[in-house]
Amino acid sequence: MPELLRAMTGFLLSFYGALPLVFSRLLDDIFLLPKQVFLYAGATVCFLFLVSSWQKKGVIFLGPFFWPLLLIVLARFVSIFPAVNKHATASSVAEGLSFLVLVLGITGYLQETEPEKRRRLFFLLVSVSLLVCLYGFFQLAGFDFFPWEVPAGSQRSLLSTLGRRNFTAEYLVAVLPFSFFLLVTEKSLGRKIFFLVTGLVGLLALALSFTRASYLGLAGMLLFLLPFFKKKPNFQVVIFLALVSLWQSSQAQVMKFDPTSGKSRLLIWKASLAMFQARPFLGVGAGNFEFVYLPYAKKVNGLVPVGERVANAHNDYLEVAAEQGLLGLVTWLWLVICFFQVGLKGLAIRKKDERLLLLTVMASTTGILVNSLAAFPLENPAVVQILALNLAVVSFLSQEKPPVFSGYLKPAMARIISTLVCLVFFVCASASLSASYLLKKSRRLINLAGQTANALFWALAERNGRLAAAFNPYSLEAHFHLGNIYLSGNYPAYARDEFATGLKIAPYSDAVANNLGISYHRLNQLAEAEKYYLYSLELNEKRPETYNNLGSLYLEQEKKEKAIVCFQKALRLDPTFSLAKENLERALLEK
């Protein structure tokens, strides 16, 4: 076991440090997937540290956050009853369980290792953050080493190291306090300079990201960092100058902010509150926000998406309330309150460096929580990683004479349960990772097929798309993409089956309903085609392509007046829609 633990220690260090650089390559329009893979893999690894604790002591330290975390999992489980997509809720339950195991495992790791190895973990964390920032500066200079496949409009051209610039900013808010902790507690001058550079580079990168939610997170984080500098006036000057630089940068480039983001957030929050009011106790189902958003948005005149779906509430608290109701919100707030209560209690019983570490993790967590008021950092795998570490550090330092066991679990039963859970984690992680890889590969191949008109590329894209849907049969993106491949290859019957499956997964998706209508249209089943075109417009009346499709159908049925109205509506929504313009001219000529 010691050799295994040493190997796992190295893996855990690499895992924690390299996550932003490795899993970010999987980011695309299903960018939430890496979070699941990360949690499953991390829980599997940390399980070995729990085994070590059982072998040495026969018990496991559950820590002060076990019950709040367990109740969060139970709240997600209960929300499966009202969910329209029960698989998404089941995935959310699995994420909650894996996060619980991850916190317990990291706590066990902190207990089993000496202070220098624990410090090495923080060192690796801030070192990788420096690489993230430097890569972002390369991007600013026009050099990028990876092809990012994030949806249009995500402003990925600026400091998008983690796929989007706001992902990078919220990650930096969470990791920057560790740079300051290492700086203050380091005795070597060379390392002090390194940590100072790391902190200032992180602040500069954060300033250049132009993400207002992360600026708020930074302000909240600094509240807990202030005690660091009470007796260090020189470093106060450095921090003051860094903040002045941040302010000047943000003011000089204020137009870099998206002027519509504030208004769109308010409209999304309005729809989120409508979800909560409609189902105040259990919510609409954990992980179901994007699947039920459209009807609620239309109900309260909220933001109705034109091109991209609304996948998040852009406020983690509202999203929890909407998805899991009062039960989920209360359990989440209980965890937050418990975290700070235990952390502040630890400040009174720990030595200086340990008190500084407690302040560090509370500062980091405060930054995450404040950022969550106007964004969704808890959907960012790099931020979830740091939150788990923060909980584990406070759990480890909360006891006067560690380890004091606040909870017990019999070794035999614990091994059986955890082995089964970790086996599920492993299978889910493998399937999710495989589906993501195959889907990305299929998208590249279908693009090549369109550029080269090569049938082989189309066949390979179709094969990879089928495999992606097989590995993750509940993936809306996989079925939607595969349906589009069949439409492009003129296989409408196969396309119909894929879009029908997609509509079962996401019954309120206007895009899927529109494409299902196209499939029926090409099969000459006009009544069914009209039904799904109308349903798509019922969900989202701002889809010009659906009006054009419906107009074409009416034109085939000799309903020229209805066709003209549809083409005119399409052109009002998109005056540059050339196909609708041609169809309108043809309809007017035939009239």
Image: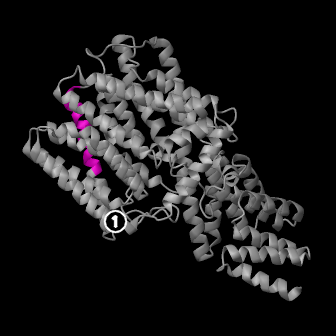
Q: Is residue 458 above or below residue 173?
A: below
Location of residue 332 in the rendering, given as x and y in whole percent from the top left corner: 49, 31
Location of residue 224 in the rendering, given as x and y in whole percent from the top left corner: 27, 38
Q: In the picture, residue 582 is in which quadrant?
A: bottom right
Tell which of 320 and 65 is nearer to you. Answer: 320
Q: What residue lies at 34% left-to-right and 33% top-to-bottom?
A: 390
Q: Is residue 358 above or below residue 178?
A: above
Q: Main secondary structure of the magenta part?
A: helix
Q: Quadrant where the C terminus lies?
A: bottom right
The stretch drawn in magenta includes residue 471: no
Q: In the picture, residue 577 is in which quadrant?
A: bottom right
Residue bearing the label numbered 1: 139
Magenta part of the chain: 114-129
Q: Amino acid at mark 1?
A: Gln
Tell which of 476 and 260 is nearer to you. Answer: 260
The stretch drawn in magenta includes residue 119: yes
Q: Quadrant where the N terminus lies?
A: top left
**Residue 472 visible in the displayed image:** no
Q: In the picture, residue 530 is in which quadrant?
A: bottom right
Q: Is residue 8 above or below residue 479?
A: above
Q: What residue lies at 36% left-to-right and 64% top-to-bottom?
A: 145
Location of residue 469 in the rendering, given as x and y in whole percent from the top left corner: 64, 50
**Residue 186 visible in the displayed image:** yes
Location of residue 587 in the rendering, given as x and y in whole percent from the top left corner: 84, 83
